[in-house]
Image (cartoon, rainbow, N blue to C red):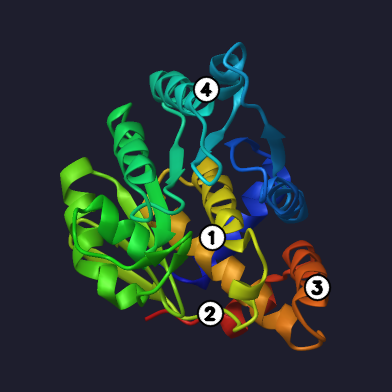
Amino acid sequence: MFSSTTVISDLNKIRSETPLIHNLTNYVAMNITANALLAIGASPVMAHALEEVEDMARLASAVVINIGTLSPLWVEAMKKAIRAAVLKNIPVVLDPVGAGATPYRTETARQLLAAGPVAIIRGNASEIRALAESRSQTRGVDSLETSEAAIEAAHLLSRQFGLVVSVSGPIDYIIRDSDLIGVANGHPLMPRVTGLGCTASALTAAFAAVNQDYFQAAAGAMAVMGIAGELAGENCAGPASFELAFLDWLYRLSAQDIHSRIKIK
């Protein structure tokens, strides 16, 4: 059963094992993604070149595929990284940034799903519904729908592809087949800092690197994100100071912080 004890155990493993997380992510989020992974104790690497993605994926403990800034070469590199990771039983986390906003993004996300078994999809409600071929409202890469609106689509995706779906929102929903965990931690300033959704995907990969129960790993990552966000928001002036405080709290987060603050639905 998912609990604060699971989250604490996984966080301690990340801090002691320093898993290498291979990120094929977007230009906008690279800096905060790398800093967040370092703050919780993981080791980030950003490698996109076709000539090395397979080798890097094979070295990693988990791989993040993030389609925020697409190009044909990057898409090919992403497919190669997925195939290499799958052959080594390395978990892949797919962040379908902006799926539903343009046909190119939606089709690319579906091609990446087909490239090999993905362990976890992490996205907002609009992105998840777009992948499940439901009607969704997306403005750029931002969701215009609540996480609750994507629960049915998440169940469909989970069953169709045999993976875990993590839907972010005021309440994060983590779904595997018919199972569901809700995590109600977070802060209103989190959507005001660019790249925090991408950071959630990177942290999800770090947790998946140390816990082969990807359902619980995804829930643990969202709990840590939300709790660090709550603590960061207590003494900040706005988005800029929030971002710095968020990274500090990822680094400082204690077992007591998790025990006392986690909100499981």
The earlier-in-sequence mark between 4 and 2 is: 4
Disc 4 designates what residue?
A: 73
Instruction: Look at discs 3 and 2 and give the one toward the viewer.
Output: 3
Kindly indicate whether the residue at mark 1 contacts the one at mark 2 (C-beta within 8 angstroms). no
Q: Is residue 181 above or below residue 198?
A: below
Q: CA distance from mark 2 to mark 1?
A: 11 Å
In the image, 259 versus 64, the foreground residue is: 64
Q: CA distance from mark 1 to mark 3?
A: 23 Å
Q: What x and y, as percent, mark residue 262? A: 54, 79
The earlier-in-sequence mark between 3 and 2 is: 2
Disc 1 designates what residue?
A: 221
Q: CA distance from mark 3 to mark 4?
A: 33 Å
Relative side of 263 to 109, left or right: right
The earlier-in-sequence mark between 2 and 1 is: 2
Label 4's element?
A: helix
Disc marking residue 240: 3
Relative side of 216 to 210, left or right: left
Relative side of 203 to 32, left or right: left
The earlier-in-sequence mark between 1 and 3 is: 1
Q: What x and y, as percent, mark residue 124? A: 41, 64
Check disc 3: other Cα within 10 Å, few if <14, some if 14-19, many if 20+: few
**Which amino acid type corresponds to the residue marked 1 in the rendered image?**
Ala
**Which amino acid type corresponds to the residue marked 2 in the rendered image?**
Asn
Residue at x 23%, y 64% (from the top left corner): 179
Label 1's element?
A: helix
Instruction: Look at discs 1 and 3 and give the one toward the viewer.
Output: 3
Q: CA distance from mark 4 to mark 2?
A: 37 Å
Kindly indicate whether the residue at mark 4 contacts the one at mark 1 (C-beta within 8 angstroms). no
Kindly indicate whether the residue at mark 2 contacts the one at mark 3 (C-beta within 8 angstroms). no
Q: CA distance from mark 3 to mark 2?
A: 20 Å
